[in-house]
Amino acid sequence: MNEMQAPGQERHAGPPAARPTIPRTVWALGLVSMFMDISSEMIHALLPLFLTGTLGASVAMVGLIEGIGESTAQVVKVFSGYLSDRFGRRKPLILLGYSLGAASKPFFALAGAPGMVLAARFADRVGKGMRGAPRDALVADVTPSEIRGRAYGLRQALDTVGAFVGPLLAIALMALLADDMRAVFWIALVPGILAVLCVVAGVEDRAAGVAEGDRPPPVRLKDLRQLGRPFWGVVAIGVVFTLARFSEAFLVLKAHDEGLPLALAPLVLVVMNVVYSLGAYPAGAWSDQAPPERLLLGGLALLIAADVVLAFVPGLPAAFLGIALWGGHMAITQGLLAKLVAEHAPAALRGSAFGLFNLATGLATLAASLAAGLLWDAGGAQATFIAGAVFAVLASALVIISAGGREP
């Protein structure tokens, strides 16, 4: 029984001690993520069709822009994670990252060529990278270990509420504004500003892995030896997961190919993220009790099912079934992977551990999104989703091998 429960047991003979509550900072970070996701997804839900329809970009270019954007975010997390460990503070980098994300939004509305969209996406994802690792590390810093799965699940659930509210707003605004995507992009700035204000008012910092008043030692290369085989096993699994799960932009394109009208394109992310949001907190609570490989394999089974449906079953209803299964996979696996990173890293190296994890998965994101776009151009949607299913099967094998190789 942990130390937090012991005092309660001394005072009360019978009932067990109450479970710790999720800290206020975790709730605040969830709300910040929600507002920024509303802002980002209002744009992201329309961006593939804006690129291909308005700006004349190829699907391969969409994959390249998505891959560069997402991999940039993951690479920047290495440096932001390290800096948050080095200086012992998470909030300044979190604030800077959300501010840059908000500031990038007007440039999507002003874009006259794919290159400007790439630049705006790059700046937006640099902001995401600045805030990502410090934010995830701060959740672990402020949360007792016995409810850490719930904490990550809650933050992810609120984040994902934004991810479906944003596309719903995009649909409503497209109807009100006669399909004027640039006007929607301008309005997306408003929730971005609200996210920044929530960081300022609601997030409380704490020393990162060191006692109050101590200066944290610099993170050196030899310190990374403390990140042992279990941590690198999580990294390996995360990389293969990422290769199996390319950008959601391809879900939008698949639904459009099956007959979804332009104005309703954001429904793709609405459906995916409703499932994701509803499942994230229960999955987080489950991860506090169940073996992690059980959840990982369950999530991969949903991803394989999604890819098979999207590859082989024609029609718009089947496309949305595949999209819903994709969201179920995200709900089960994303908070769990964050929890596993936190659990396999020393407190003083949490930011760096999240940064390294996201560097590895970011490079995989670049490869996966570019390959998905090339496969789509060469062989259509079916080739793209078959490849995703193959990598999901490989990820399942890796999870099984990793679980079988653990010490009893």
Image (cartoon, rainbow, N blue to C red):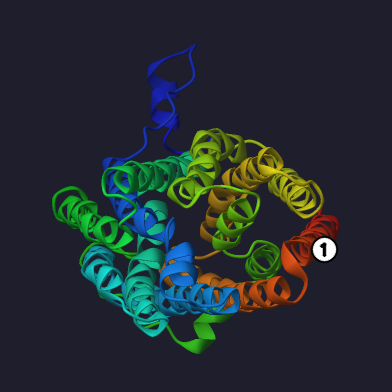
Q: Which residue is mark 1?
A: 390
Q: Quadrant of the N terminus?
A: top right
> Whole-percent x and y of residue 309?
77, 47
Q: Does residue 305 sit above or below 248 in this rendering?
A: above
Residue located at (37% from left, 18% from top): 11
Q: Does residue 236 sit above or below 41 in this rendering?
A: below
- Residue 146 seen in this snapshot: no
> Whole-percent x and y of residue 34?
33, 47
Residue located at (68% from left, 47% from top): 292
Amino acid type at circle 1 is: Val
In the picture, measured across the screen, residue 90 lies left or right of residue 60, that is left
Q: Quadrant of residue 230?
A: bottom right
Q: Nearer the viewer, residue 38 or 52?
A: 52
Residue located at (44% from left, 31% from top): 5
Q: Nearer the viewer, residue 134 or 273?
A: 273
Of all residues, the one furthest to the top in this rendering is: 14
> Whole-percent x and y of residue 371?
68, 77
In the picture, measured across the screen, residue 394 lies left or right of residue 244, that is right
Q: Does residue 5 sit above or below 25 in this rendering?
A: above
Mark 1 secondary-structure assignment: helix
Q: Quadrant of residue 171?
A: top left
Of all residues, the one furthest to the bottom in this rendering is: 221
